[in-house]
Amino acid sequence: MLMPIIDPKMGRMSPPDAMTWAFKRSGTGIAWSLVGLMIVGGLILGLSVAACFLPYIFLGLPLMQTVIGAAYALITSPDIDGMLCEHCGYARQGNDSAQCPECGNNWKIGARTA
Protein backbone atom coordinates (compact mmCIF):
# COMPACT_ATOMS: atom_id res chain seq x y z
CA MET A 1 0.00 0.00 0.00
CA LEU A 2 2.86 2.41 0.70
CA MET A 3 4.54 1.91 -2.69
CA PRO A 4 2.05 4.07 -4.68
CA ILE A 5 2.36 6.82 -2.07
CA ILE A 6 6.19 6.87 -1.95
CA ASP A 7 7.19 5.93 -5.53
CA PRO A 8 7.44 9.18 -7.59
CA LYS A 9 6.90 7.29 -10.91
CA MET A 10 3.41 6.32 -9.87
CA GLY A 11 2.38 9.88 -9.06
CA ARG A 12 0.95 11.11 -5.80
CA MET A 13 -1.96 9.11 -4.38
CA SER A 14 -3.93 9.63 -1.25
CA PRO A 15 -3.82 6.76 1.28
CA PRO A 16 -7.38 5.54 0.47
CA ASP A 17 -6.58 5.55 -3.28
CA ALA A 18 -3.31 3.71 -2.62
CA MET A 19 -5.15 1.09 -0.57
CA THR A 20 -7.72 0.60 -3.32
CA TRP A 21 -4.95 0.32 -5.92
CA ALA A 22 -3.04 -2.22 -3.77
CA PHE A 23 -6.14 -4.37 -3.25
CA LYS A 24 -6.93 -4.33 -7.01
CA ARG A 25 -3.35 -5.34 -7.92
CA SER A 26 -3.19 -8.17 -5.40
CA GLY A 27 -5.09 -11.40 -5.78
CA THR A 28 -8.49 -11.89 -4.20
CA GLY A 29 -7.22 -14.18 -1.44
CA ILE A 30 -4.19 -12.02 -0.72
CA ALA A 31 -6.24 -8.85 -0.22
CA TRP A 32 -8.46 -10.45 2.39
CA SER A 33 -5.43 -12.05 4.03
CA LEU A 34 -3.93 -8.58 4.42
CA VAL A 35 -7.16 -7.32 5.99
CA GLY A 36 -7.12 -10.29 8.37
CA LEU A 37 -3.50 -9.57 9.22
CA MET A 38 -4.39 -5.95 10.04
CA ILE A 39 -7.26 -7.11 12.28
CA VAL A 40 -5.04 -9.60 14.13
CA GLY A 41 -2.35 -6.93 14.55
CA GLY A 42 -4.94 -4.55 15.97
CA LEU A 43 -6.18 -7.20 18.42
CA ILE A 44 -2.62 -7.91 19.58
CA LEU A 45 -1.98 -4.20 20.04
CA GLY A 46 -5.24 -3.78 21.98
CA LEU A 47 -4.48 -6.71 24.28
CA SER A 48 -0.97 -5.37 24.91
CA VAL A 49 -2.33 -1.97 25.90
CA ALA A 50 -4.96 -3.60 28.14
CA ALA A 51 -2.29 -5.75 29.82
CA CYS A 52 -0.37 -2.61 30.71
CA PHE A 53 -3.31 -0.67 32.14
CA LEU A 54 -5.40 -3.37 33.87
CA PRO A 55 -3.02 -3.78 36.84
CA TYR A 56 -3.11 -0.01 37.35
CA ILE A 57 -6.91 0.11 37.20
CA PHE A 58 -7.61 -2.94 39.40
CA LEU A 59 -4.67 -2.80 41.82
CA GLY A 60 -2.86 0.53 41.83
CA LEU A 61 -5.87 2.86 41.76
CA PRO A 62 -7.86 1.16 44.60
CA LEU A 63 -4.72 0.86 46.72
CA MET A 64 -3.93 4.54 46.22
CA GLN A 65 -7.51 5.54 47.11
CA THR A 66 -7.41 3.39 50.26
CA VAL A 67 -4.15 4.92 51.46
CA ILE A 68 -5.32 8.46 50.73
CA GLY A 69 -8.66 7.79 52.48
CA ALA A 70 -6.99 6.38 55.58
CA ALA A 71 -4.53 9.26 55.75
CA TYR A 72 -7.35 11.77 55.28
CA ALA A 73 -9.35 10.17 58.10
CA LEU A 74 -6.38 10.36 60.45
CA ILE A 75 -5.44 13.93 59.53
CA THR A 76 -8.95 15.36 59.75
CA SER A 77 -9.98 13.61 62.97
CA PRO A 78 -10.37 16.39 65.56
CA ASP A 79 -9.67 14.14 68.54
CA ILE A 80 -6.93 11.89 67.18
CA ASP A 81 -4.77 12.55 70.26
CA GLY A 82 -7.52 11.27 72.56
CA MET A 83 -7.88 8.06 70.55
CA LEU A 84 -4.24 6.95 70.87
CA CYS A 85 -2.25 5.84 73.91
CA GLU A 86 0.12 8.64 74.94
CA HIS A 87 2.89 6.10 75.64
CA CYS A 88 2.85 3.59 72.77
CA GLY A 89 0.36 4.97 70.22
CA TYR A 90 -2.08 2.06 70.48
CA ALA A 91 -5.58 2.96 69.21
CA ARG A 92 -8.01 2.84 72.12
CA GLN A 93 -11.13 3.10 69.98
CA GLY A 94 -13.72 0.60 71.28
CA ASN A 95 -11.69 -0.21 74.40
CA ASP A 96 -13.37 0.79 77.69
CA SER A 97 -10.69 -0.45 80.07
CA ALA A 98 -8.64 1.94 82.21
CA GLN A 99 -5.33 0.59 80.94
CA CYS A 100 -3.75 0.24 77.51
CA PRO A 101 -3.66 -3.47 76.53
CA GLU A 102 -0.45 -2.88 74.57
CA CYS A 103 1.84 -1.23 77.15
CA GLY A 104 -0.19 -1.47 80.40
CA ASN A 105 -0.10 2.26 81.20
CA ASN A 106 -3.23 4.18 82.20
CA TRP A 107 -5.20 6.15 79.63
CA LYS A 108 -5.67 9.88 79.90
CA ILE A 109 -8.83 10.59 81.92
CA GLY A 110 -10.26 13.25 79.56
CA ALA A 111 -9.67 11.27 76.40
CA ARG A 112 -12.43 9.90 74.23
CA THR A 113 -13.40 6.27 74.87
CA ALA A 114 -15.45 5.36 71.81
Image (tube, rainbow, N blue to C red):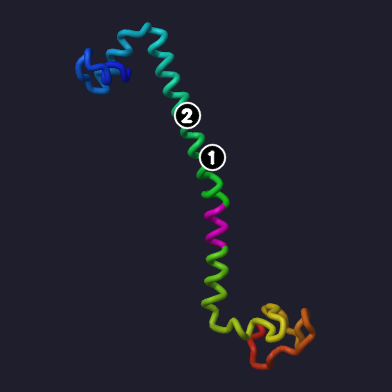
- The earlier-in-sequence mark between 2 and 1 is 2
Q: Nearer the viewer, residue 8 or 87?
A: 8
Tell me: 71 left or right of 29.
right
Magenta stretch, main secondary structure class = helix
The residue depicted at 68 percent of the width and 93 percent of the height is 109
Whether residue 31 appears in this view of the structure is yes
- Residue 25, relative to residue 86: is it above or below? above
Q: Residues within 10 Å of mark 2 (few under 14, many from 20)?
A: few
Query: Which residue is label 1 attached to?
Result: 51
Q: What span is in magenta?
A: 60-66
The residue depicted at 53 percent of the width and 39 percent of the height is 51
Picture quadrant of residue 82 = bottom right
| Residue that extends furthest to the left in the rendered view of this protein | 11
The residue depicted at 48 percent of the width and 38 percent of the height is 49
Residue 34 rendering spot, x and y as whole percentages: 41, 16
Residue 56 rendering spot, x and y as whole percentages: 53, 49
Tell me: 41 left or right of 27.
right
Q: Nearer the viewer, residue 83 or 46?
A: 46
Q: Please tell me whether mark 2 sits on a helix, a strand or a loop.
A: helix
Residue 89 rendering spot, x and y as whole percentages: 68, 80
Amino acid at the residue labelled 2:
Leu
Whether residue 94 appears in this view of the structure is no
Residue 57 rendering spot, x and y as whole percentages: 52, 49
Q: Residues within 10 Å of mark 1 (few under 14, many from 20)?
A: few
Q: Please tell me whether mark 1 sits on a helix, a strand or a loop.
A: helix
Query: Which residue is label 2 attached to?
Result: 43
10 drawn magenta: no
Quadrant in the picture for the N terminus: top left
Q: CB atoms at circles 2 and 1 under 8 Å apart?
A: no
